[in-house]
Image (tube, helix red, strand yellow):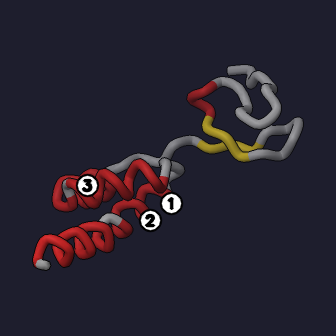
Amino acid sequence: MTIVYIIIVAVGLGFVPALMARKQGRSFVKWWIYGAIAFPAAIVHALVLKPDHIIKCPFCGGMTGTAKGYCRRCGYEFIM
């Protein structure tokens, strides 16, 4: 029964770095898994995380990161 409690606590603690990373434009699910598996490392990593540059697509209005070079919703290519 203690294994179940450990898993529940780990899943709950995983939300903290996931929410912090989501504010920086990162994937919530990936950071939630990372936080549940390695909470101490994930919380430190989320604290020093730099924001992903997110811009609004001028064509469709969707939010996307500039690192991709194109909008993932409509395919519009950004001029860098």
Task: Give whichever of discs 1 and 3 has the lower sequence position.
Answer: 1
Cα gap from disc 3 to disc 2, whole angstroms:
11 Å
In this view, 49 is above or below 23: above
Where is mark 1, residue-wise?
23
Q: Quadrant of residue 57?
A: top right
Label 2 secondary element: helix
- The amino acid marked with disc number 2 is Leu
Label 1 secondary element: helix
Q: Residues within 10 Å of mark 1 (few under 14, many from 20)?
A: few
Q: Residues within 10 Å of mark 3 (few under 14, many from 20)?
A: many
On the image, the x and y values in percent for residue 17 come to 34, 62
Say whether residue 33 is left or right of residue 73.
left
What residue do we see at 38% from left, 53% from top? 31
- The amino acid marked with disc number 1 is Lys
Where is mark 2, residue-wise?
19
In this view, 19 is above or below 57: below
Check residue 42 in the rendering and tell me which mark sits there, or answer none. Answer: 3
Mark 1 and mark 2 in contact? Answer it, CB < 8 Å. Answer: yes
- The amino acid marked with disc number 3 is Ala
Foreground residue, 39 or 54? 39
What residue do we see at 30% from left, 58% from top? 47
Q: Residues within 10 Å of mark 2 (few under 14, many from 20)?
A: some
